[in-house]
Amino acid sequence: VQLVESGGGLVQPGGSLRLSCAASGFTFSRSAMSWYRQPPGKERELVAGITNDGDTTNYAASVKGRFTISRDNAKNTVYLQMNSLKPEDTAVYYCYASWGGYGYWGQGTQVTVSS
């Protein structure tokens, strides 16, 4: 299983970024997917999740209405569209998949929101 995140960077408050996570090594269309983040000096936390068919999503209260998780099963990719970014969204963002009874993480992508 391999998960490769991309799309992070430095953005000003109020700006937008779209993260991507390219998956391989398992049947992506049969796996729910999630995005987590770990702010500096804090615990890793769930940001958003999506079912295998994309029909159901869930969000942390802190990002609801600003972030959107989506997936393209033809491309084995899950996305996180982040709008109206705030300094407190600064974190390393990780893609997560559960498959065969194990959990798998990507290497993470840094998002920094600062003026």
Image (spheres, helix red, strand yellow):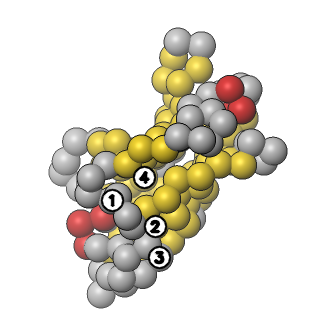
Residue wearing tag 3? 16
Q: Is residue 14 visible?
A: yes
Label 3 sits on a secondary structure element that is loop
| Sequence-first tag of 3 and 4 | 3
Residue toward you, 40 or 81: 81
Write down the residue under mark 1. 63
Could you say where residue 56 lies in the image, as x and y percent from the top left? 53, 40
Q: Callout 3 environment at 10 Å: few (<14), some (14 to 19), or many (20+)?
A: some
| Residue pointed to by mark 4 | 93
- Residue 50 bears which disc, if any? none
Disc 1 and disc 2: Cα gap in Å? 9 Å
Q: Is residue 59 above or below residue 102?
A: below
Element type at mark 4: strand
Residue found at the far bottom of this picture: 115
Q: Are marks 1 and 2 in contact (CB under 8 Å)?
A: yes
Q: Earlier in the sequence, mark 1 or mark 4?
A: 1
- Could you classify mark 4 by the number of other residues whose Cα lies within 10 Å: few (under 14), some (14-19), or many (20 or more)? many
Circles 3, 2 touching at the beta carbon (< 8 Å): yes
Q: Amino acid at mark 4?
A: Tyr
Q: Amino acid at mark 2?
A: Met
Compared to 4, does 79 lie above or below?
below
Which of label 1 and label 3 is nearer to you? Answer: 1
Q: CA distance from mark 3 to mark 4?
A: 14 Å
- What residue is at 35 percent from the left and 58 percent from the top? 64
Give the label, 1 or 4, closer to the camera: 1
| 3D distance between C-alphas at marks 1 and 3 | 13 Å
Quadrant of residue 1 in the image?
top right
Mark 3 or 4, which is nearer the eye? 3
Return the x and y of residue 29 as percentages of the image width and height. 71, 32
Q: CA distance from mark 3 to mark 2?
A: 5 Å
